[in-house]
Image: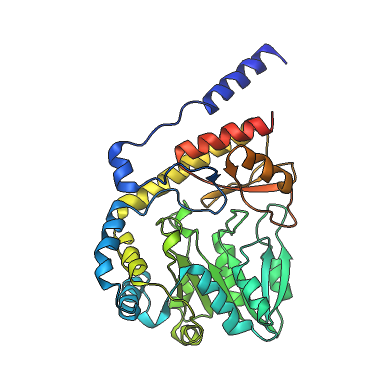
Amino acid sequence: MERRTWLKSSVGLGALLMAPQMLTAVEQKKFRPREKAFPIRLSSNENPYGPSERVQTAIEKAFVHGCRYPYAYADELAGILAKKHGVSSESIIITGGSTEGLRITGLTFAAGGGEIIAAQPTFLAMMDYAAQWGAEIKWVPVGSDKGYDLDAIEKRIHSNTKLVFLCNPNNPTGTLIPSQNLIDFCNSTSQKTIVFSDEAYYDFIEDSNYPSMIDLVRKEQDVVVSRTFSKVHGLAGLRIGYLVARPALAHEIRKNIVAMSNVLAIEAAKEALKDDAFYRFAIQKNKEAKSKIYETLDYLGLHYVKSHTNFIFFHSKKDIRTLGPQMLEKGIRIGRPFPPFYDWCRISTGTTEEVAQFTKALLEVYS
């Protein structure tokens, strides 16, 4: 190795292994980084911060309402969300996490032989559940850039297609559909069938002008959008999300609600919507964590997809079924296999300390 190259790699390695910057006592109190645990779980795209101090206080105050059914509380939250998104309250369905929203929508429109078209790989909650109830799933592989092949999806639509599922940004690839392509596709496709737009990671999109398909719901098109409080708001363990659809579609979906949420989660969600300081903090820390992971992958020469989420999909060049146990031995739990990309890995962002441990472990595995 040339001396210049050796110096460059040595400096790079030193920078990667620098001690992580710690949060201040005030930040720890307000934003609640998760406690250190072994193994470190970077496998489920959870926010490593929260619930925030403000939200925890709201949860504690809500305990007095624990004897009540959640319906009236959910209606109040639906009103807040309706105002936020510029739709009627009838268009909002509060769910037990967005996963319930995905499942009941697939069940509502595709059970008993109806067809759902989805990319591969993508988030499977809707398709796995709907298939149990007799739906037929048609898979369309992602393109070479790991993004959606909208042309191929559109060509697959026919009379028995009840729903087209879009996860945008996509899980696990982290890709984002170009905004005009998304608008054109949803405008066209919603004239033929229902489009479901899973926007669980919408808050991590850095383009402030990027459209939400809630815009099309306001135009009374056959589009259903899911959102969650699990990601940027740090409420994954409380299970609360919501759907947005024109009232007639929402009415049909609402018939299949099975879990809903609970009073504590609803009050937490209401407070989370007001907690701008935590929202900004979570976004910034996610960007910092992604940057550190990118640096590690660049150093190792491992290709990755530029992410619009709180995780990164990278070309591990190792079978994930081998890499997973190797990383777990070093105290890091990484994402599961996503067929057919067995030599790719999804890694979630974590706290500064967790990402530093991931870097150390990955360097050791690839040494």
- Outermost residue on the top side: it is 3
Quadrant assignment, res 95 = bottom left
Q: Which of 346 and 2 is in front in this view?
A: 346
Number of numbered markers: 0
- Pinpoint residue 129: horizontal percent, then vertical percent: 62, 74
- Pinpoint residue 228: horizontal percent, then vertical percent: 45, 64
Would you place residue 26 above or below residue 57 in this image?
A: above
- Pinpoint residue 349: horizontal percent, then vertical percent: 51, 45
- Pinpoint residue 196: horizontal percent, then vertical percent: 56, 73
Q: Nearer the viewer, residue 344 or 61?
A: 61
The quarter of the rendered structure image containing the N terminus is top right
Q: Can residue 315 be seen in this view?
A: no
Q: Nearer the viewer, residue 158 or 37?
A: 37
Q: Is residue 112 visible?
A: yes
Q: Residue at x 74, y 41 (%)?
A: 317
Q: Nearer the viewer, residue 233 or 117?
A: 233
Q: Which residue is drawn at 27% across and 40% down?
A: 26
The quarter of the rendered structure image containing the C terminus is top right
Would you place residue 86 above or below residue 348 in this image?
A: below
Q: Which residue is drawn at 55% across and 58% down?
A: 169
Quadrant assignment, res 35 = top left
The chosen color scheme is: rainbow
Q: Which residue is drawn at 60% across and 54% down?
A: 175
* 281 relative position to 342: left or right: left
